[in-house]
Amino acid sequence: MTNRKVIHARNKKRDKEKLFDSERKRVKDCVDENKLDSDQSQTSDEYAQDNIEGD
């Protein structure tokens, strides 16, 4: 009976770690997408600034 409890606890801990890793990866992907968006918006801001200075 004790071995079953130990195995169950170990599996539960491993599943929790997998969930945490997948969640961390998802958050990292979202942050990377936001960086791309912010890079694009900075580029468009610079583009607008160049147009203003050009006039």
Image (cartoon, grey):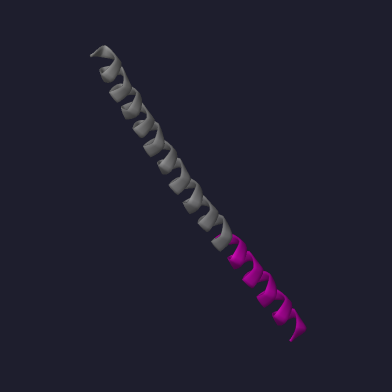
Q: Which residues are magenta?
A: 1-18
Quarter of the picture holding the C terminus: top left
* Magenta residue check for 10: yes
* Residue 13 relative to residue 1: left or right: left
* Residue 28 relative to residue 6: left or right: left
Q: How many numbered discs?
A: 0
Q: Horizontal and vertical percent for residue 10?
A: 69, 70
Q: Horizontal and vertical percent for residue 15?
A: 59, 66
Q: Is residue 22 above or below residue 52?
A: below
Kindly indicate the quadrant of the structure image that contains residue 13. bottom right
Kindly indicate the quadrant of the structure image that contains residue 14. bottom right
* Magenta residue check for 43: no
Looking at the picture, tell me which residue is in the foreground, 3 or 18.
18
Give the residue displayed 27% in from the left and 19% down from the top: 52
Quarter of the picture holding the N terminus: bottom right
Looking at the picture, tell me which residue is in the foreground, 5 or 53.
53
Give the residue displayed 57% in from the left and 60% down from the top: 20
Name the main secondary structure of what is drawn in magenta.
helix
Looking at the picture, tell me which residue is in the foreground, 40 or 50.
50
Q: Is residue 27 above or below residue 40?
A: below
Q: Horizontal and vertical percent for residue 33?
A: 41, 42
Taking the view exactly as shown, the residue that stands out farthest to the left is 55
Give the residue displayed 26% in from the left and 13% down from the top: 54
Give the residue displayed 44% in from the left and 38% down from the top: 35
* Residue 10 relative to residue 21: left or right: right
Taking the view exactly as shown, the residue that stands out farthest to the top is 54
Taking the view exactly as shown, the residue that stands out farthest to the bottom is 1
